[in-house]
Image (cartoon, rainbow, N blue to C red):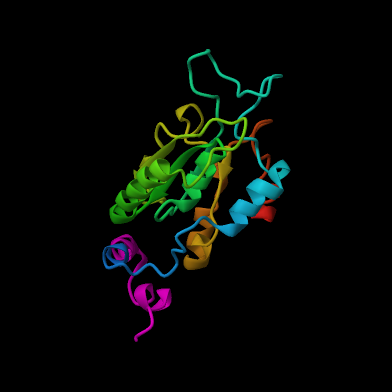
Amino acid sequence: MASAPQLSELFGAIPVSQHPKQWDKCYKESLSPWDRKMPSLALADLLVQRPDLLPPAQELDPRGSPLRSSPTSPADSRSALVPACGFGWDALLLASFGYNVWALDVSSTAIEKAKEIEKESLEKDWYKTREHFDRGSITWITADFFDQDWAKNTGVDGTGKFDLIFDYTVCLLLEPKTAVIFFAPSHLRRGPNGPSAWPNSSITKAV
C-alpha cells in the first residue's frame, strides 16, 4: 500500500501563490495526513492543566456564574483565533471552554467539513462545556490568512484583535520570510485582559 505523500512533495514544487488551491485540492482528495481527528494534545493540556497561562474565557460573578451584559444575553466571552483550522478540532475544544472562536482556513472544503463536524459534535456532545462556563460560539471563515480583509468585524468588538491566537504546526509549513508575517502581532489584543507581548508572552512559550 502506497504511503501518503509528504507535504514537501505536495507543495515544494509549486509557487507560494498557488498554495491555497493546493490545500483545497488536498482536502478534496482526502489527502490530510496531518488531521488526527482530535484537538491538539498540547492545547488540551494547556487548557486543563495550566489555565493560569491563558486569558480566562469568561469572568465569573461571586456566585460562580459567567458575567453577562444583561440577564438574557450570552456570557461575556473572550475571543480566540485559530488560523489554518482544518476540520476545526481545536476550535471546537476552545468553544467548549467558553471562548468565542473565529476559525479560519483557506480551504472551503475543510471549512464545510468543519461545520458538519461541529453539528455532529453538538448532537453527540463530544465536547462537554466546562463547569461554570457557557459554551462559546464558533465563526467559520474561508479565507487566506495573509489577505487581511477577513479580519473585518471579527474578534474583540469587531476590531480584528483577539485575546488568544492558537497555532500548533502551521509555522512549520511556511517559508521563513512568510512565517515572520504569519506571527506578526497585528491580530493579538494588548491590555490587561489579553497577552501583553508577542512572541515573548507566556502563551507563546507554553504552546
Percent x, y for residue 145?
A: 41, 50
Q: Is residue 65 above or below residue 21?
A: above
Q: Which contiguous range is marked in magenta?
A: 1-24
Is residue 179 found left or right of 3 in the rendered image? right
Percent x, y for residue 193?
A: 65, 31
Q: How many marks?
A: 0
Q: Is residue 34 magenta?
A: no
Hey, which residue is sitting farthest bottom in the picture? Answer: 1
Q: Quadrant of residue 13?
A: bottom left
Please name the residue shown 52% across and 46% down the image: 93
Is residue 134 found left or right of 206 in the rendered image? left
Q: Is residue 30 visible?
A: yes
Q: Is residue 61 above or below residue 169?
A: above
Please name the residue shown 54% across and 24% down the image: 75
Please name the residue shown 41% across and 73% down the image: 7
Closer to us: 137 or 116: 116
